[in-house]
Image (cartoon, grey):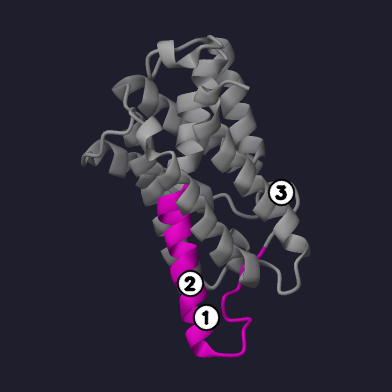
Amino acid sequence: MKKTYLPYLVPFLVFLVFTYGGAWLPGGPHIYYPIKTLVMAAVLWYYRKAYTEIRPHFSWLAVAVGIVTFVLWVAPEGLYPHIGSSEFNPYDVDAAWKAYVLIAFRLAGAAIVVPIFEELFWRSFAVRWLIKEDFTNVPIGAFTWFSCCVVILAFGFEHHRWLVGLVAGILYHALLYYKKDIFECILAHAVTNFLLGIYVLATQQWSFW
C-alpha cells in the first residue's frame, strides 16, 4: 500500500472498526462513540500535514448546500425503506451529566470529525484514485462519469438512509465540481450534520442518530 493512501484510508478504517465492532461492546454506542470521536480526531491530527488540499475559509454557497441537504435528508422520512437501522439516545444513561457529555461528543463527532474524514476519503481520495492510481497528481474536482457515479453510489449506500444519502452525495459532488475545493464540501457536510443534530435534539427522533 502506498504511503500516500494512509492518511485517507486509516481514518476510514478506524471509523469502520469502531462503528461495526464497537456495537458489540457492553453499553453500545454510549461507550464507544466518545472513544471513536477522540481516536478519529487523533488520527486526523496525526496525518494533518498530508491534507494540503484543505484550505479553510467561509462560503455562503457551502452553507446553503448544507442547509438544503439537511432539509432533503429529513423531509422524505417514512417514504422509503432504510438499509438496517440505528438509534443513539443520549438520555439512556443513569445521570444527566453523562447525557450532556454524550450529546457534546455526538455533535462534535458529527459536525467536525465526520465531515473532515468522509470528505477527505470520498471526494478527495476515492474520486481521484478512480481516475488515476497516483491520485495526488489528479486535481481536486477532476470529473469523470465513472469516478463520480461510483463514489456517489458508495457514499449513498454507506448510510442507512440510502436514498437521501445518494441525494447528499450528488449535492456535495456538484459543489466539488463547481468550486474545485474540498473545504467547501467539508463545510457543507458540517452544516448538514450540525443542523441534523439540533433537529434530533429538538424532536427526539433518535433514529436519525
Instruction: Give left or right: position of 146 versus 101.
Output: right
Q: Residue at x 32, y 21 (%)?
A: 180
What's the residue type where badge 1 is placed? Ala
How far across and down, in percent of the image, does residue 188 sit?
36, 42
The residue that label 1 is drawn on is: 99
Q: CA distance from mark 1 to mark 2?
A: 6 Å
Q: Quadrant of the rendered structure where residue 95 is?
A: bottom right
Q: Quadrant of the C terminus?
A: bottom right
Q: Quadrant of the N terminus?
A: top right
* Residue 95 visible, this orientation: yes
Mark drawn on residue 82: 3
Label 2: state its secondary structure: helix
The residue that label 2 is drawn on is: 103
- Looking at this rendering, what residue extends furthest in the bottom direction? 95
Task: Check whether the beta carbons of the residues at disc 1 and disc 2 lie within 8 A of each other.
Answer: yes
What segment is highlighted magenta in the picture?
Answer: 87-114
Q: Residue at x 67, y 54 (%)?
A: 19
Q: Residue at x 38, y 39 (%)?
A: 48
How far across and down, in percent of the image, does residue 40 sit?
52, 51
How far across and down, in percent of the image, does residue 106 sit?
50, 64
What's the residue type where badge 3 is placed? His
**Residue neighbourhood size for the residue with mark 3, other residues' Cα within 10 Å, grouped as few (<14), some (14–19), many (≥20):** some
Instruction: Give left or right: position of 208 versus 19.
Output: left
Q: CA distance from mark 2 to mark 3?
A: 24 Å
* Residue 71 visible, this orientation: no
Looking at the image, tell me whether mark 2 or mark 3 is earlier in sequence order.
3
Label 1: state its secondary structure: helix
